Amino acid sequence: MGGDSPEREVSLASGAAVAEAFREGGYEASPVDVTFTGRFPARPIWDVLNSELLEADVWFLCLHGGFGENGGLQALLEEKGVPYTGSGPLASMLAMDKWMSKKLFMSEGIPVPDGMLVGPGEDGRILEEIGLPCVVKPRSQGSTVGLSVVRCEGEIKKGMEFAGAYGDVLAERFITGRDLTVAILGEEALPAVEVHPKHEVYDYTCKYTPGMSEYTVPAELPEETADALKEHALKAFKVLGCRDFGRVDFRMDTEGGTYCLEVNTLPGMTSTSLVPKAARAAGISFPELVERIARMAVERR
């Protein structure tokens, strides 16, 4: 847990919650705050990878964003033969790359918002090919870090600079409507959750500030729509090659059409995060959820 990405604080909260859940279940758990760059007063990953922790039954990854979620750490753990939770290196990399994952979703017939990669000075392309309103965001970040909803031409440059601070920039058509998410556990899609953020989008503030979002669990959807959403979530999860657990985010427009935004391979895992909320709706307690995820990793050993 921890790491060096903009989602560090969320990661620490996830790690603490998962450790407590293991202890509630009668297991020993050792939270380890790691750094990949030395920017934070945490244990260097190279030290951890050459320590007694290699003998642990399983590493439960609670890193969000950056090297901990983009496949880098997963590749190192594969090389060491360490059993770890979540998707492997390639699936993690594809899920973090919003442009590549969009292409793969389209190949499976999963609806996605129109979008394109844009560079500096390409404001006109956004207006011509995407139109307004649109979303401008980094190609490879999580938790809506660097994301802007652009409603007028004068905001495009500012949005591109904001997203560009994190790398390549992706522009997408903004889908007016509802925020929905489907958690995946193994081969099962859990009940959909609807998010009611105080802001126009479910941004970083709404995700992690108490009182800034409300939730309907399970989401109030016609049975046919709920089933289709689960089907698309499983397809998106599988086309990227994901495993164990994850979360697939959607927007639903005012006419009931759903659009897949992304797959999160290491979603938030506090007791109030979206995946645990969906699990509770399916009758799965937080300690049971954590144990089931860990067992999947152990069984691959």
Image (cartoon, rainbow, N blue to C red):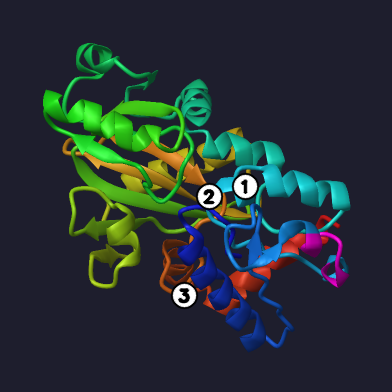
Mark closer to the observer (1, 3):
1
Q: Does the magenta stretch include residue 33?
A: no
Q: Which mark is residue 295?
A: none
Evaluate whether residue 179 shows in this view: yes
The quadrant where residue 83 appears: bottom right
Q: Label 1 sits on what residue type?
A: Phe
Q: Residue 65 carries which label?
A: 2
Q: Is mark 2 on a helix, strand or loop?
A: loop
Q: Residue at label 1? A: 67
Q: What is the C-alpha distance between the residues marked 3 and 2?
A: 19 Å
Q: Which residue is drawn at 38% across and 47% down?
A: 145
The quadrant where residue 273 appears: bottom left
Q: Label 3 sits on what residue type?
A: Ser
244 w.r.t. 21: above or below: above
Q: Are there few (<14), some (14-19), or many (20+) residues within 10 Å of tag 2?
A: many
The part of the chain drawn in magenta is: 47-53
Mark closer to the observer (3, 2):
2
Q: Nearer the viewer, residue 120 or 284?
A: 120
Image location (x, y in percent) of residue 34: 66, 63
Q: Pick the quarter of the image with the C terminus.
A: bottom right
Q: Residue at label 3? A: 271
Q: Which residue is drawn at 33% across and 55% down?
A: 204
Q: What is the C-alpha distance between the residues marked 2 and 1?
A: 7 Å
Q: Are there few (<14), some (14-19), or many (20+) residues within 10 Å of tag 3?
A: some
Q: Which residue is drawn at 49% across and 23% down?
A: 103
Q: What is the C-alpha distance between the residues marked 1 and 3?
A: 24 Å
Q: Earlier in the sequence, mark 1 or mark 3?
A: 1
Q: Are there few (<14), some (14-19), or many (20+) residues within 10 Å of tag 1?
A: some
Q: Residue at x 32, y 22 (%)?
A: 114
Q: Cβ–Cβ below 8 Å for labels 3 and 2?
A: no
Q: Label 2 sits on what residue type?
A: Gly
Q: What element carries label 3?
A: loop
